Each structure stands twice: as C-alpha cells, then as structure tokens.
Amino acid sequence: MISILIAASIGLLVSILFTPYLIRAFSRQGFGQEIREEGPQGHKSKRGTPTMGGVAIIVAMVVGYFAAHVIDWLRGSRNDGPTASGLLVLFLAVALGLVGFLDDFIKIRKQRNLGLNKTAKLVGQLVVAVAFGILVLQFADENGLTPASQNLSYVRDLTLIFMPVPIFIIFTYLLISAWSNAVNFTDGLDGLAGGAAAMVLATYVVISFWQARLSCVETPQAACYDVRDPLDLAVVAAAATGACVGFLWWNAAPAKIFMGDTGSLALGGLVAGLSMTTRTELLAIVIGGLFVVEMISVVAQIAVFRTTRRRLFRMAPFHHHFELAGWAETTVIIRFWLLAAICCMFGLGLFYSEQLGLGGG
C-alpha cells in the first residue's frame, strides 16, 4: 500500500512541477496547437497553445513508478522490485506516446491539424501492439502465470473463449488501437481526457490492489484472482493517476498546455494494457465508458453520413455537438467528467458484485 501512495505522490509532484517547464520551453520553440477550421468558433483562440504536454504525463508516470520501487528497496521492503507485468504496461504506454509525439511534431512543423497520415499512424500502433502481444505471453512466474492470458476476460478469464496466438495478437492490436484512438477522440476540450483518464486509472488502482489482496497464490479460494503481479500493476496505475492529476492542474480550462497525441495515445495504451494484465478486458468497456461512447459517436457519424449524406451530430466526437448546441465548454467538460465518474463507479460495482457472488469479501 505504501508503494502505491508513493508512486501516486511522486507522479503528481513531477507532473505538476515539470509541466510549467514544458509550457515555457514549447512556447519558446513555437510548438503550438493547430485548430480544426470547421470546429467550434470559440476554439480559434486556442491556436498556438503549447501542445505535446503528454511528455509530462509519461515522464511523471515513469519516475513515479521507479521511484516507488527505489524507496521500497531503501526501506528494506520484501517486494521483488519492478515486475514483467508492470514494465510491459509501461512499455506499451511509452511506445504509443512516442508514436503520438511524432504525430504532434509533424503537425507543428507543417503547421496543420493533421500529423502522421492514417497509414503511418496505424503502422506505428501495429508494431507496438504486436511487440506487446508477443511479450505479454512470455515471462511466466513460478505458478505458470504470464502477464496476460489467451482467454478473453470479464472480471477474470472466461475459460470458454480461448484464442490461439495469432488470433490473440490480432485481438491485442484491435484492443490497443481502439483504446488509444478512443482517448484520442476524447481529447478535444480542456482537461476532458485528462480528468476522465485519471478516474479510469484510479479505478484500476482499486481493482488491482483488491486482486493483490485476494491473489490465488496468497489466499486460494473460489473468489481469488489468477493475476500476475497485481500489486505492481496498482503501482503503475497509481503513478499514472498522479501524473494525470498533476497535468490537469495546467490543462484544465482555460488550458495552458494540451496533452496532444503524445498523451492521449499513451493513456489509451495504459487502459488497454491494464485491462489485459488485470484480466478485465470486457469490464474495461464499462469503466472507460466515456471513451467508448466518444469513439462510437465518430464511427456513427461517419457511417450515417456515408449512407444518407446527413450528419447524425452537429460535429463528432460528440462533445463538440453540445458545444455547437450552445453549451459552454466548461459545462460540457464537467458533465462529461460526471459521466466518466458514473461509468467508473458502475464498473467497480460490477467487479465487486462478481466477487461477492463467488463468496468472497
């Protein structure tokens, strides 16, 4: 528990102190955000606001994670240090963050709102996802558990749905691509994606900590969890939560910096990685419900327009629909944060109710 608190605290401090440095540095270099011409008119004033602030989230998360382990070691803790599961989830987030960084950098250099083309972006996500999909089935511990399993999962593995390795790698790519793009779509208003991501990651702190308390290795029973390194996954999620909250201090409306694709792809990777390593892939759809709905709004907008030549929403992702309907930006953000919190609480309720149903807790 102490390591979780340390990771969250250091992630918060590094993020809240490092972000102003990035604001100054990126402002001097002219690393400003380009704005969609067809977007809400109120967004035009945001042109030139420093972007790529996701660098602060990634740095703070990594520092928070490793600092927690160093302090654990100095305290003489019996923890074994960084684990395969924790390091792989960090790898996924950082690698996707690098893809997003290239996207942001090209936007800035070419002074346009589009960075990497769709093919290049998908190839970058594909390479990262395939590497993660292969590695996450390696590193079995003494109990034979690997960081992820080839079974689809809800709150634990569904034994009836087993995926051969090729199918699992395809599934991994689809999952990672879906989550990274879902968070990316949500990142359109000041603090919206950062605040929602902090709630989702905090939910995963609770889930993975609970899984550690009821690990089948420590307390074998009907309600136990076969998850490799759940406590270390809680440390990763805590460091990322602290990093998001610290960044939100500067990213909340009116934003002084945007996370850009650097941050949104990394956060999407975190959600995907945590869902796989905690065996909660289907439950994550509920926990990250706001991100899911934002992505669905984009898909629905495209599908309806191509079939009927009419728009389902005034603009997609659909948070812009409410802006164009006359809602103030801060009203949209706060109400969407409330929706994200409801999804997280409902997801936690489903997680705990399943555990209770098996006679645990």
Image: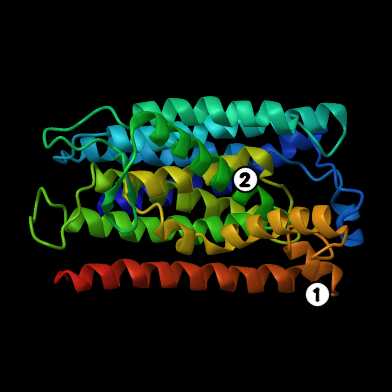
Q: CA distance from mark 1 to mark 2?
A: 25 Å
- Work out whether 258 lies above or below 345: above
In the rendered image, is residue 200 in sight?
Answer: yes
Where residue 253 sits, quadrant-wise, is: bottom right
Residue under label 2, please give it.
181
Contact, CB < 8 Å: mark 1 with mark 2? Answer: no
Q: Is residue 241 above or below residue 236?
A: below
Residue 202 appears left or right of 40:
left
The quadrant where residue 255 appears: bottom right
Q: Amino acid at mark 2?
A: Asn
Quick check: 282 left or right of 332? left
Residue 51 x %, y %:
73, 41
Whether residue 18 is visible: no
| Along the viewing direction, whichever of 284 and 162 lies nearer the viewer | 162
Look at the numbered disc 1 and give the secondary structure of its residue.
loop
Q: Position of residue 159 (x, y in %)?
A: 24, 50
Depth check, front residue: 18 or 280? 280
Which mark identifies residue 327?
1
